[in-house]
Image (tube, rainbow, N blue to C red):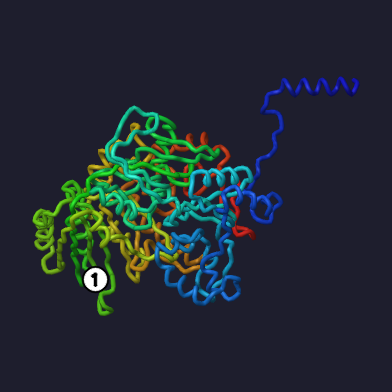
Amino acid sequence: MSTIRHNLLLGLLLLLAPLSTIAKPAAPQCKTVPGSPDWPSQETWARLNESTGGQLLQPTPPGAVCHPGQASYNADECRRVQTGWSTYEFHGEDPVSADWNQWNNDSCLPVPDFPCSSRGYPVFVINATTPEHVKLGVDFAREHNIRLIVKSSGHDFLGRSTAANSLSIWLHHMQWIKPVDTFRPKNCDVTIDHAVTVGGGTQMFSIYQATDKLNRTVVGGGAKTVSVGGFLTGGGHGLLAPRYGLGADNVLEMQVVTPNGEIVTANECQNTDLFWAMRGGGGSTFGVLTSVTIKTYPTPSITHVEFSVLTLDTENPALFAMIAYFLSQFPSLADAGLSGYAFFFQAIPNGGQSNLGGITMTAILQDTNTTFAEQLFAPIFSHIDTTWPGIFYPAFKTTPYPTFLEWYKVNYDNSAAGTNSLTGSRLLGEPSLTGNLTLTAEVFKAFANVEAPVGGMGTAYLVSGKGVHNAVPRGGGNSVLPAWRKAYVHATLVTASAFGVGFSPLNRTSRADAMKRINLALDPMRKLAPDSGAYANEATPEEPDWQNQFWGSNYQRLAQIKRRVDPTDVFWCHPCVGNEGWQEVEDSNGGSLCRV
């Protein structure tokens, strides 16, 4: 056979062959990292910077100013960094820092005796102030196979807002607020009274301040620096949620930059699958939220309730029986309008002389009728006094506030950042709280003693109720974990020194021990509420069967949407929808993201 005929026949066979039998270029096995042949050149990065109008940053780790061997060393600046390190605000205002040290691999803490390098941080950052900046970053990461990160405030208990060898899109300066008296979602023939449209990096305190001027408010988070992106895409609980629904239930419209670089509007009339997924399916997964419109409500007057039931007899078996009884009252308290944050403990030091055990709570009722608050708690305290006489010492106080903002300015979350800690959580419905109080007492004792023998603490956040159970999100629903629709309590692990269980920096053994203790505390809680789940924004990243525990029956649809909108995994984080095809690999590069 002549060469010409052979080539013609071969070409014909190739044309007739199924496409699946033709060899395709192999997909890259890992995201590219600095130093690899396909990492963009300096000239390429310079062109990206030019296209963004000079918004491309290459930051040094903020802790480097404390290390004499680093080019940015500055003793005066070091003192400022060390002072600010424990605050949410410091990390939110830095383009690469995260609120908890381990998410940057402890690679440059503001401690001169520790090592310092940039290997735990993004390499470049786009300081995005417009959706077009975000689009340029998404397109660049996709085209050059670079790991892409989205950071707003860095207030992420699961560390999704930072990663080594990545390009980060920083939304911190996309903060703007526009109240809307009557809102019409794009391409919809409906109008909705009273809303607010905000930029994708806008923080809760700013929204509370702006809406308060109109005598209104929103369902938002407890810390000032929590921003709308991670809060709303993860579900979003707060003290107004038991009445008005979760944050995600109140989203009316979103502007999103998709993985393919489109700037789209998602609402109940268009891009409906994306609208469903982005309200509860998690951040850094389906796209970048550049603006969002949220329902507002008349700001309520507030009765602030503080109570404690304490004992010095911390080894008394009645301690957790009392705590279990008090928690069994939470569903009826929530139905009566109460929401709040309860803390329970067995061995909290009391002035160095003894330990205290018991339960304490800060809560709100949405009125200023202090008599009602007293009537609500009177039978509970009476039962404790009658059942366990002489053991417990109740204390009760109420304070009225004219608006939610006035209450918030005094009672916002100001716990410490800049630590090494991991947490865990569980959602609890009425059967788990009221069914078997003996079992509940045992479970919460294990939960509170996660830091034994030094003593520990647990929480029971009363942040769900009728408003969450009966929520009717626009468009017929959203992707929030269905367990929220029956839960009353979001129980989390905390300690006296950190939100979660602390461990030593740069110490694998200490971190592994912390994770072991978290699971020892969570396992009984999972058995107490086996058909429930955990709130994905405040959970352990090592939650077993996290797909079901964080999203339940919604996970399959979420994964299908993820595959459709992001087939090449431009966005990846853990634990996040559709991430099963990749894993983080420790290597000499400081960490790579590679296909499984």
> Residue 272 vs residue 579: left or right?
left
Please, is residue 15 above or below residue 316 in the view?
A: above
**Residue bearing the label numbered 1:** 356
Q: Name the secondary structure under disc 1.
A: strand
Mark yes or no: residue 411 visible. yes
Task: Work out which quarter of the rendered image holds the N terminus and state it.
Answer: top right
The residue shown at (28%, 45%) is 487
Residue 317 in the image: state x and y as whole percent. Answer: 22, 65
Packing grade of label 1 (10 A; few <14, some 14-19, many >=20) is some
The residue shown at (31%, 47%) is 529
Residue 226 in the image: state x and y as whole percent. Answer: 38, 54
Residue 222 in the image: state x and y as whole percent. Answer: 31, 56
Toward the front, the furthest residue is 53
Q: Which of the 4 quarters of the picture holds residue 192? A: top left
Mark yes or no: residue 528 visible. no
> Residue 238 vs residue 508: left or right?
left
Q: Amino acid at mark 1?
A: Leu
In the image, 423 versus 90, the foreground residue is 90
